[in-house]
Amino acid sequence: MKYRFLAHLGLPLAGCALLLPSAFAADPSAAEALSPRPTGVASAADGWLFVAEKLAGWNVVLGGGVLIAPTYEGSDEFDVQPVPFVTATLGEHVTIDPRGVSVNVYSLGDLTLSGQLGYDTGRKQSDSDHLRGLGDIDMGGVVGATLTYEWGAAEIYGSLERIVGGSDGTQATLGFKLAHDAGQFRVSAGVSTTWADEDYMQAYFGVTAAQSALSGLPRYEIGAGFKRVDLELAATYAFTEHWLVRGEVGLGYLLGDAADSPVVQEAFQPSVMLLVGYRF
């Protein structure tokens, strides 16, 4: 299936931002509990201690889980796939996760501007019999920027991303999120809408004359426009100081010309993800 690790999961990892409660703070005394070793004697434990200390400084979470989502954007079939659960943050400025790297470059009060580098995995015609004859959409790099305004537990954000290679398209997302902490729980909800330019829409939803002849689908030309809306619900539970479990439900719906494309079999695009992680 197609992953977009920067804006919505085209997830489908739609919005897979990892919201970690403050209860997951690292325990610096763990290193002191280890017995001292003779000077000059290297050991696996010494190496692990060094790595653990560095990971704690970066606020690292490692784990994995499973994703159930449409085989491709617009499919009526579903895939069950393993997914990584890996994040590393340095203060409030740098975040590294499966979507790529995000850096906060400017803040003014509750307003924050960040830049992102990531990738778009494209789409393979072998993903579904319905895509046969349409050809592959190659992987591309993603360069993006996000402007976020925080208002208490809520935030409003707008993002713009450019795909270099692959579809060579541009997407923009406008969204709203609300989060609440309750003891060891953190719950969040968000709604967003995504616009795409003509290059992106034609690559993923259009059918050229050559593609029509090979696939049997009718020729279809499509321009820029809003392609989908998404509702995302998530809950994170810290059941120990280090271990956490997270569940996400995404409810997407394709809009307008995108939904009318012969490539699309189903406009309603739900997804479910369950993750387990360990925080260092």
Image (tube, rainbow, N blue to C red):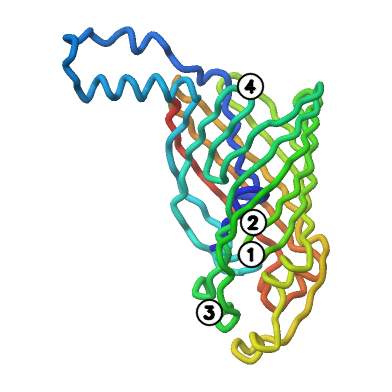
Query: Residue at label 2?
Result: 10
Residue type of the residue flagged with mark 3 = Asp
Instruction: Give amino acid for label 4.
Output: Ala
Q: Position of residue 38 (x, y in %)?
A: 16, 9
The residue positioned 43% from the left and 35% from the top of the image is: 62
Are circles 2 and 4 on residues that touch, CB within 8 Å? no
Q: CA distance from mark 4 to mark 1?
A: 35 Å
Query: On the image, numbered disc 1 is attached to which residue?
Result: 73
Residue 272 location in percent, x, y? 57, 50
Q: CA distance from mark 1 to mark 3?
A: 14 Å
- Residue 221 point in image, percent of width and height: 78, 79
Considering only vertical position in the picture, is 93 above or below 249?
above
Q: Circle 3 is placed at which residue position?
A: 129
Tag 4 or tag 2, which sits nearer the N-term? 2
Q: Are marks 1 and 2 in contact (CB under 8 Å)?
A: yes
Task: Between label 4 and label 1, give the one nearer the viewer.
Answer: 1
Of 24 and 2, nearer the camera is 2
Whole-number angstrom distance, CA of label 3 to CA of label 2: 20 Å
The kind of secondary structure element at disc 3 is: helix
Residue underneath mark 4 = 182
How would you rate the neighbour count of disc 1 (Cα within 10 Å): few for under 14, some for 14-19, many for 20 or more?
many
User: The residue under label 1 is which amino acid type?
Assistant: Glu
